Amino acid sequence: MDRPYTFINVAMTADGKIDTFERKGAAISSARDRERVDQLRAAADGILVGGRTLMDEDPKLTVKSESLRAERVTRGLAPNPVKVGVGSIINLKSSSEFLKAGPARMVIFTTTQTSMDNLASLRGHGVEVFVHEGTRVDLGEMMKTLKKLGVDHLLVEGGGTMNFELIRLGLVDEVIAYMAPMIFGGANAPTLADGPGFPRQAAIPLQLSDVEKWEDGGIVIRYKITG
């Protein structure tokens, strides 16, 4: 396979929302789920987010547990996976957690719409920048590049539009979701997979591979994409 094995992980409400309509990164995960996510991160070679998530939520994309980081080092790996941001236009402040938190290799995929000043700033912070022509990053080519960079297992942490596009293009192998016992509602609140959507006849088939019911009322569901 000329791309990484790719799995999406989300924390969502019982009505499928990954944030409120305010889109401010509302807390959904329980303490136990945050530990689960940290283990997923530690097992991955790279962690990817879309541009909106990157710039609105400014995630660190690092392994929080010192013991998990140490375990990676004993396996001959860097303490943290490669941090990957993807967006047509990227504009990060120098104080961005994406740039500061680490240590970690940082990679950005963007387009010629990102200004030369912003590209220079990213490179000045040690980011490896790949610029695609046009108005959108070619996600298929991006995946091939990540594979060449040594990313064999890629964890995708959103947002909903990025999830949808990767699924639409057949670039995702698994979907893992923590379903929290709460409802956000909201027609404009983001979901696991946003974008234009699929007609019924083109719905993506999934195969259930695991379900865990937790005492906190949450459920962890794991699906393999079969279509």
Image: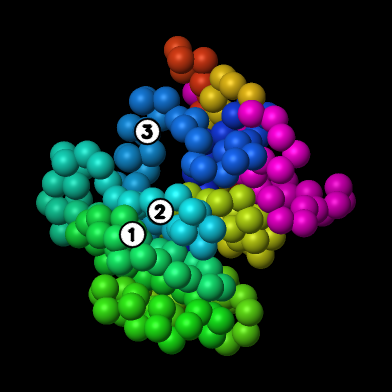
Q: How far apart are the alpha carbons under marks 1 and 3?
A: 22 Å
Disc nearer the start of the sequence (3/2): 3
Task: Residue 130 in the image: state x and y as whole percent.
Answer: 43, 80
Q: Is 166 on the left or on the right of 61, as rendered?
A: right
Residue 128 in sight: no
Q: Nearer the viewer, mark 3 or mark 2?
A: 2
Give the answer, above or below, for where 56 lies relative to 67: below
Q: Are marks 1 and 3 in contact (CB under 8 Å)?
A: no
Q: Residue at x 77, y 53 (%)?
A: 197
Disc nearer the start of the sequence (2/1): 2
What's the amino acid at mark 2?
A: Asp
Q: Secondary structure at mark 2?
A: loop
10 Å crowding of disc 1: few (<14), some (14-19), many (20+): some
What's the amino acid at mark 1?
A: Ser
Residue at the far top in the pictured view: 215
Q: How far apart are the alpha carbons under marks 2 and 1?
A: 6 Å
Q: Is 58 on the left or on the right of 186, as rendered?
A: left
Q: Secondary structure at mark 3?
A: helix
Give the answer, above or below, for where 157 lies relative to 30: below
Residue linked to disc 1:
96
Q: Residue at x 71, y 56 (%)?
A: 195
Q: Nearer the viewer, mark 1 or mark 3?
A: 1
Nearer-the-camera pick, 33 or 186: 186
Disc nearer the start of the sequence (1/3): 3
Q: Are marks 2 and 1 in contact (CB under 8 Å)?
A: yes
Residue linked to disc 3:
34
Residue linked to disc 2:
58
Give the answer, above or below, for where 47 lies relative to 28: below
Q: Residue at x 66, y 48 (%)?
A: 193
